[in-house]
Image: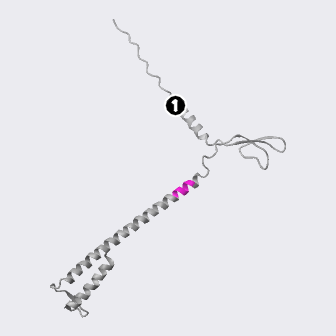
Amino acid sequence: MRSTAVPRRLPARRCVRCVRGGLAVLACALLAMPAAAALYKWTDANGHVVYSDQPPPGDVKAETLKAPPPPANPNAVKDMAAKDLELKKKRAEAADKDKKAETQRADANKRAEQCQRAQLQVRQLSAEQVPITRINEKGETVYMDDASRRRERDLVEAWVRQNCM
């Protein structure tokens, strides 16, 4: 016995034209929504009823039939500009503060290095058994005597007391 199979029915497919048409109608409706403006109704001097999207001229009493929604915040643009300006000002202040801190760190490092050099110079001048030479105005090498070593050491120690403590 042969079975007679009933062919299965495929699910209904939507018509491509119908879908595209529906999307086109939806897009047009969405685009037309912002274009909706207020509609004014008034009676002119001759007694004719006038409908217009422009408000009536002069002191004519008009009735608004369909008004657009009021703006959410009329000062929103000004507020946003003020906030943007404030943010830029804060960023500039932070950059200036960082720059000033970096300059202070560099100055402190430079001062510490100068102090280390001066303290080393004081130790060298204090070690009297080590000969120290200088070059005079004529370009000759001259050994420092004890008196000039003490004067030089006193000057360097005064600088260290003034700048390093």
Secondary element under disc 1, as helix, strand or loop, is helix
Q: Position of residue 90 (x, y in %)?
A: 47, 60
Q: Identify the residue at the far top of this view.
A: 1
Residue depicted at x 55% and y 54%:
80
Q: Which residue is mark 1?
A: 19
Q: Is residue 149 left or right of residue 33?
A: left
Q: Nearer the viewer, residue 12 or 57?
A: 57
Q: Identify the residue at the far left of this view.
A: 129
Q: Position of residue 43 (x, y in %)?
A: 80, 42
Density class for disc 1 (Cα within 10 Å; few <14, some 14-19, many ≥20) is few
Q: Position of residue 20 (x, y in %)?
A: 52, 33
Display coloring: one colour
**Disc 1 marks which amino acid?**
Val
- Tell me if residue 82 is in the magenta stretch: yes
Residue 61 lies in what quarter of the image? top right
Decide if residue 144 is in sight here: no
When the figure is inspected, residue 108 is found, relative to residue 10, above or below; the finding is below
When the figure is inspected, residue 151 is found, relative to residue 7, above or below; the finding is below
Residue depicted at x 21% and y 84%:
125
The N terminus sits in image quarter: top left
Residue 62 lies in what quarter of the image? top right
The C terminus sits in image quarter: bottom left
Decide if residue 34 is in sight here: yes
Residue depicted at x 20% and y 90%:
146
Q: Identify the residue at the far right of this view.
A: 46
Q: Is residue 23 left or right of residue 148?
A: right
Residue depicted at x 82% and y 40%:
48
When the figure is inspected, residue 120 is found, relative to residue 81, above or below; the finding is below
Dominant secondary-structure state across the stretch colored magenta: helix
- Tell me if residue 46 is in the magenta stretch: no
Q: Which residues are magenta?
A: 79-84
